[in-house]
Image (spheres, helix red, strand yellow):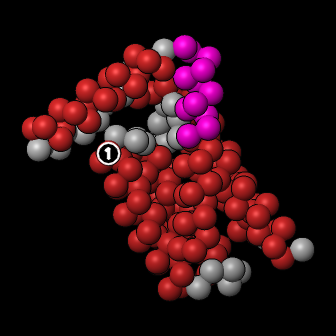
């Protein structure tokens, strides 16, 4: 229960940082991961192995999504905190929920901005050039600061917590 509250606080702080400065600072991410690890181990909500595997899964998935241009560096590093506190199984569920929430949010933004045709055309041209040239170049969004992924991450944490409550109770 303590780790749930701690993760909720970290999610709120990350979202506030991301919305106000459009960055989640490295110092915050490292401190949150270390405090989260200490909390998870002290309360025995996560084993050492599970926390390390959670960190590993969070590191790899964050790196892949960052390399693809899907998320920014601070979001990828915030994965560490979640992975350490939740462990690898729960982090996997959180990541799936966050990706789903991010997809729904992106769809809503496309509907409200009404520039979906232009965005899909840009994405199609990027994919076409990547496959035809057989070389990878990181996808750069038109406005990478437009979509803070910390919000879908926080939603993913909340969804995982609700799912766990449904299963256990």
- Badge 1 element: helix
Residue 109 on the magenta span? yes
Name which residue lies at 44% across and 18% down: 117
Neighbor class of circle 1 (other Cα within 10 Å; few <14, some 14-19, many 20+) is some
Main SS class of the magenta portion in the image: helix
Residue 107 makes an appearance in the image: yes
How far across and down, in percent of the image, does residue 163 sit? 76, 64
Residue 89 on the magenta span? no
How far across and down, in percent of the image, does residue 100 sit? 59, 48
Question: Which residue reaches farthest right?
Answer: 169
Magenta residues, start to end: 103-114
Q: Quadrant of the N terminus?
A: bottom right
Reply above or below: 33 against 53. Answer: above
Residue 6 makes an appearance in the image: no
Nearer-the-camera pick, 118 or 16: 118
Residue 71 position by quadrant: top left
């Amino acid at each position: 229960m303590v780790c749930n509250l701690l993760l909720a606080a970290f999610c709120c702080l990350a979202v506030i940082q991301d919305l106000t400065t459009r960055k989640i600072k490295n110092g915050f991410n490292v401190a949150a991961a270390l405090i989260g690890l200490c909390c998870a181990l002290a309360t025995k909500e996560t084993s050492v192995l599970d926390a390390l595997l959670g960190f590993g899964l969070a590191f790899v998935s964050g790196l892949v999504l960052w390399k693809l241009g899907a998320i920014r560096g601070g979001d990828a590093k915030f994965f560490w905190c979640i992975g350490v506190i939740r462990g690898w199984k729960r982090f996997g569920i959180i990541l799936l929920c966050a990706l789903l929430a991010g997809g729904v949010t992106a769809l809503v933004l496309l509907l409200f901005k009404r520039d979906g045709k232009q965005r899909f055309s840009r994405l199609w041209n990027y994919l076409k050039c990547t496959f035809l040239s057989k070389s990878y170049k990181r996808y750069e969004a038109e406005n990478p600061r437009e979509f803070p992924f910390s919000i879908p991450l926080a939603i993913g944490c909340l969804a995982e917590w609700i799912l766990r409550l449904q299963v256990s109770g």
